[in-house]
Image: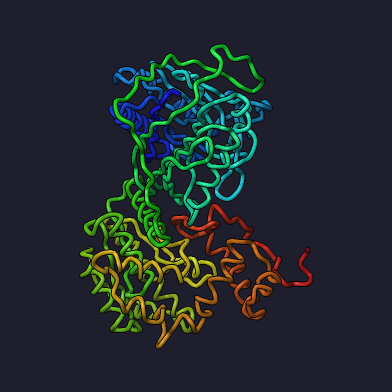
Amino acid sequence: MPTLRIALAQVNSTVGDISGNAAAIRRWSRAAAEAGAHLVAFPEMMLTGYPIEDLVFRNSFIEASRRGLATLAADLAADGLGELPVVVGYVDADGPAAISSDAVPGSGRRDASALLFRGEVAATYFKHHLPNYGVFDEDRYFEPGHDLTVVRLGGVDVALTVCEDVWQAGGPFTTARQAGVGLVVNINASPYELNKDDLRLPLVQRRAVEAGAAVAYVNAVGGQDELVFDGDSIIVGADGSLLARGSQFVEELLVHDLELPAAADDDPAPLPGIIRSFIPKNMDKNPETQGAGIAERLSDEQEVWQALVLGLRDYVNKNRFPSVIFGLSGGIDSAVVAAIAVDALGPERVFAVSLPSGYSSEHSKDDAADLAKRTGLNYRVEPIQPMVDGFLANMTLTGLAAENLQARVRGVILMALSNQEGHLVLTTGNKSELAVGYSTLYGDSVGGYNPIKDVPKTMVWQLARWRNTQGEPPIPENSITKPPSAELRPDQKDSDSLPDYEVLDPIIKGYVDHDLGRDELIAAGNDPALVDRVLRLVDIAEYKRRQAAPGTKISGKAFGRDRRLPITNKFREGNAFSPL
């Protein structure tokens, strides 16, 4: 049986940076060649970055992608890598976009994969299955392919597929079995969510058995706005056995030797739906067998933490912000954001501001200063009471309006420092607060990015405790153990306005993440009056969430791209007059 040494490059790309992404492909291809690889595969849309969203409608962007692909093929050959087949994702088109009045059924924009060899585009494949759920809108952007591309490489038939093709039974993997391929290469930009790695392996194993072929699944790494890609590339045998698995949240090159069946026929009969290409690649025998190994899985807390760190780091660096700034209250949320920011960027790029009012407790001020000392971040104190008093001397505000004034003064200070010094403002509200609207619009909600936007309050505590076990604890114990409070009035506690988070979070998860209705939530054992109260809070806070900063997605359904509800909406769960 021929031995094919495959390299899977689970690497980071940036949307729109075609030249920078091409340079990364050349660099990692060089590493693959030096490792003796016969084939190297890069993630979905590696050349353009993913997701490209409405950039796909611009003819100029499509042309830049196609021109970049041709240039990349020539550059690889000029680098002395022309004999290394390189599989790379890009965007192509064989017709106007579907939204155009000139659109032609069966043609349009394509989520594509290309095999580059000897300075040319030797083969292409168009993604068949286009996801249109969750964060995906691919049916809006792309036209599906229908043919399977099979490349004869050194006597082995290799099929090309893209991402969602592996998530759907039938389709190209069934066709791959009919074609008798020995290997299916599946390139991905599969976004992270907690425990998704537990779904991937059995999924890839099922497709391998379905195809009767080994499957090499390569996934992207890195952050793109709200999304994080976690790597976790996988190679399985034709029987579904796990052969190699990559790390999570780390750029790396998996190099693995596969013994594959030789192509059965030197001149295979044409089959409908199969496009064959022949690559005159000599698969020289490597002197030593190479195995990529199986990377150890991360705990849930470590997995989420790494996602939050990578998401923030890439958002800041790819958008070229020099530093971040946020309010450090001494409470648990801002403490966790501070620890994430320091892990992501280093303390020298992290600026925290204590913004005490007349209601700020001494322990909160002490806890903020303690965290700053523990982490080494840049720290200053800007008391807000004189500014609040200035407002109140000129207009009469009481109750909630006076409380929210404090939060808005803090927001003004943070935005002023951002403008003056060039920092990106981070907001520090968690998913539980965002769900029920427990924040002040244009106050503590101001900011350009929210690292814990998709993290429920109970998980915020869980992450804090875990992070404090990893080396020197960055978070003061008092920030973790004291009752949460906004400290906008005397002796205020979150529990004055909200149920305990241990009770609240499961209701939010059922309603938001799983779309359960009132009756289903009550059937799960929740108090009916509490369910009604929480659902009302969630429903009326939609206008606030529409104005919220983006933040890293770590759950099955995050606020923003995942959950799209009208702001003006009179439907209420449990209302007998609401339509069924």
User: Residue, x 35% and y 70% (percent of image)?
Assistant: 465
Task: Answer whether residue 426 is visible to the viewer in this image.
Answer: yes
The location of residue 430, given as percent across then percent down, is: 45, 67
* Quadrant assignment, res 271: top right
User: Residue, x 44% and y 55% (percent of image)?
Assistant: 552
The location of residue 59, given as percent across then percent down, is: 52, 28
Determine whether 493 is above or below 559 in the image. below
* Quadrant assignment, res 476: bottom left
The location of residue 504, given as percent across then percent down, is: 54, 74
279 horizontally vs 210: left or right: left
* Quadrant assignment, res 274: top right
Nearer the observer, 174 or 414: 174
Nearer the observer, 284 or 532: 284
User: What scheme was used to colour the molecule?
Assistant: rainbow
Determine whether 451 is above or below 169 in the image. below
User: Residue, x 30% and y 68% (percent of image)?
Assistant: 469
Q: How many marks?
A: 0
Quadrant location, the N terminus:
top left
